[in-house]
Amino acid sequence: MAEHRPADLKALKALANPLRQRILEALASSGPATSTTLAERLGVTSGGTSYNLRVLAENGFVEELPERARGRERWWRVADYDLRLPPPAERDDPAKAAIGELHRLWLAGDTELYERFERERPRLGEWADAIPYSRGAITVTLDELGDFFEAYLALLRRYQRPDDETPEGARRVETRMLVFPAPGGEGGRRRLNPRRALGAERPLGTQE
């Protein structure tokens, strides 16, 4: 399990780059690769991928696989890391700018990824109908929200297994979590209908 690592400005700037985000996504989705194979996949020069891989490695986001090296050919994979962004109150202007750009890149990348899933959905067979979708709200204190987030991360780690421990029939599934205070000041105090607290693409078996 990766240890928590606070993000410094150098690490934030390393992440807040469109090509580096594409490199990380390619390595995460398709496994280890060389700068040459990444360049072919992403439609860029191998010099560009090589440089950006080094930047990511310097900040602990990717790592080499020396056992797969052949001559000057170097293989890379996503490193095991748990990076935590600094709280808003602790961010100076450069950190705010880097985090703002990082959030923009993440949202754009997530939107593109989901749109690709929808295009490919007809070819996914039984997986196309097994995608849960949930929208809801909770009423919590700040401490409880922190506990909620840590519980979510613990659940993710439970299913983040090495390739040699992956059961037959398993496939990579993307997950995202978006949590924010409800607009409207004290709006969070309103009572929720528990039957409306969660939503899904398939009926939940309860009716109003």
Image (cartoon, rainbow, N blue to C red):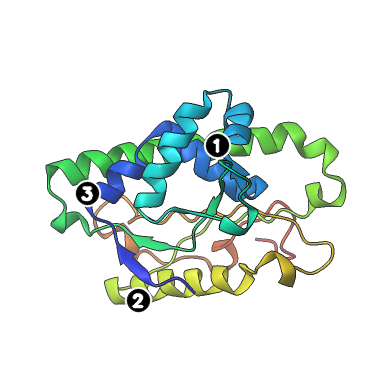
Q: Residue at x 56, y 68 (%)?
A: 156
Q: Residue at x 79, y 47 (%)?
A: 128
Q: Residue at x 28, y 42 (%)?
A: 13
Instruction: Please provide percent x and percent y for residue 9.
Output: 22, 49
Query: Label 2: few (<14), some or many (≥20) within 10 Å?
Result: few
**Residue 201 in view in this figure:** yes
Q: Which residue position is annotated with label 3? A: 9
Q: Earlier in the sequence, mark 3 or mark 1?
A: 3
The local secondary structure at tag 3 comes to helix
Give, as a three-letter code, the residue at label 3: Leu
Q: Which residue position is annotated with label 1? A: 35
The local secondary structure at tag 2 comes to helix
Which of the two marks, 2 or 1, is nearer to us in this view? Answer: 1
Q: Closest to the observer: 13 or 122?
A: 13
Instruction: Please provide percent x and percent y for residue 10.
Output: 25, 48
Q: Residue at x 63, y 70 (%)?
A: 159
The local secondary structure at tag 1 comes to helix
Give, as a three-letter code, the residue at label 1: Ser
C-alpha separation, residue under disc 3 versus residue under disc 1 = 25 Å
C-alpha separation, residue under disc 2 versus residue under disc 1 = 43 Å
Q: Which residue position is annotated with label 2? A: 144
Position above or below: 191 against 33: below
Q: Earlier in the sequence, mark 2 or mark 3?
A: 3
